[in-house]
Amino acid sequence: MSQQTRTNTPGFGWAVLTTSLAFVVAQLDVSIVNIALPEIAKAYHADISTLQWIIDAYTLAFAVLMLSAGSLSDLLGSKKIFQIGLIVFGIASAGCGLAPDALTLIIFRIAQGVGAAMMIPSSLALLNHQFAHTPQLRTRAVGLWTAAGSSALVAGPTIGGLLIAFSNWRYIFIVNIPICIIGYVLSFKMEQTAKTNKKSFDVAGQLIWMLSVTTLISVIIEVPRLGFSNALIWGGLILSVLLFGIFLWIESRVAHPMLPFHLFKSGQFNALLVLGAVLNGSYYGTVFILSLYLQKVLNYPSLIAGFAFLPLTVGFVISNVISSRIINRYGIRKPIVAGLIMFAVGFAGLFIAYEHTPYIQLFLPFLSIPMGMGLAVPAMTNGILSSVDKTLSGTASAILNTSRQTAGAIGVAVFGAMAAGGSVSILGAVSKSATISIGLTALALFLVTRSVKK
């Protein structure tokens, strides 16, 4: 390594801060919008289907483009993709803040998803490259990166409530712009990552994947409006499955697939992908429902509803702070198992949610769910990174985050569909979402205990 390279190499804190800023804005915009849904509905006279699209337009674009972004990250270098992602996300956030109608907001939410898809796998690849030679340091760095993103995810409703109370809902998007600018400036000191030997980009695979997932999410969102027996619904489901089959066929034949099948030979890799999907699908869908429950059923103002989510932030911070020490001492399996048990216990606590439930009864579930997730996610991420060559870390990160974001979009769509009939439906959706989440967590726990090494 040259003297110049050593001089330009960022320190531990600099590298973690730079990559974490991107994860913060990406995760913040998953949840901060939830608390603003009633205000957005008033501003645009939007129904619940439109509100679902405002949420899912972001997570959907995030999910369907993640694989391509990870592949580009390995092909062109993570630093370049990371910087472009920050620029796209900042510009799209300004567009969201200035959107004159719901359609324009949805379009810019898609653009935000494009930027986020570029930032996340590349930021994790940058961290993996920086600390690949020191596994314990990488574990600590990934833990702090995860803590920053997780804290932003759960702090979103609280921050959103404050911004709405003291300004208006448009500032929930404007707040991203200075963070993107700071991250972009800091990124120039980051090292460029090693590139793969790929010579081409899998265009056909990306297009078919995008159509398959978009069709599936669209169908789920439109079920309450069209009805499950509608021919368009069934046609969409069949089309989505056929497109996914074509996608797998393409990936098995192209020279440089964006989804390398050899990564799936590891049972641990597969189990961790399922785990990521369960965590995000359950969490995103439930937070969407709880945002409506607090404001539409318990009649909390947006500021109070935002503060009601504060235990979620505290739970994530506590578990993420201690997660790296636990992983270094016990490996990844025990933290994941403990985290999943806490995750399920938290959802079980939501069965007490009724029309006049005191907030104190919701406090423990609101604390237990993120604490469990905060223990499991860093261990899961380290398990994924350690199972692949560092030249494929961008792709591996993209596959993990694709499964998570796709599941998150499906969770919002499915749980939102259960809440489409007003306050009574919202109340029922809380217990239904808890039941589904507990079942999925049990499945993840079974797979983890069978497949994940200590």
Image (cartoon, rainbow, N blue to C red):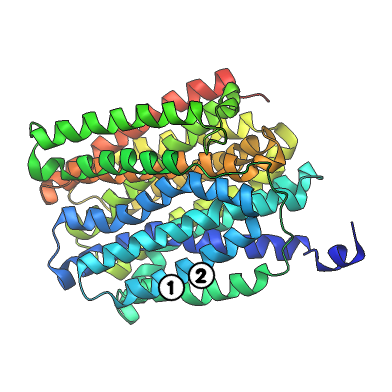
Neighbours of disc 2 within 10 Å: few (<14), some (14-19), many (20+): some
Residue depicted at x 70% and y 32%: 331
Viewer-nearest residue: 255 or 354: 255
Residue 250 as seen in the image, left or right of residue 451: left
Q: Position of residue 189 (x, y in %)?
A: 73, 68
Residue 263 as seen in the image, left or right of residue 325: left
- Which image quarter is the N terminus in? bottom right
Type of amino acid under label 2: Ile
The answer to whether residue 298 is above or below residue 218 is below
Residue depicted at x 66% and y 71%: 186
Viewer-nearest residue: 452 or 74: 74
Viewer-nearest residue: 403 or 251: 251
The answer to whether residue 421 is above or below residue 389 is below
SS for tag 1?
Answer: helix
Q: Which residue is mark 2?
A: 87
Residue depicted at x 69% and y 42%: 391
Is residue 162 visible in the rendered structure shown here?
Answer: no
SS for tag 2?
Answer: helix
Q: Position of residue 365 (x, y in %)?
A: 39, 44
Q: Are marks 1 and 2 in contact (CB under 8 Å)?
A: yes
Is residue 34 visible in the rendered structure shown here?
Answer: yes
Viewer-nearest residue: 211 or 171: 211
Q: Which residue is mark 1?
A: 91
Q: Position of residue 2 (x, y in %)?
A: 90, 61
> Disc 1 and disc 2: Cα gap in Å?
6 Å
Q: Position of residue 414 (x, y in %)?
A: 25, 40
Type of amino acid under label 1: Ile
Neighbours of disc 1 within 10 Å: few (<14), some (14-19), many (20+): some
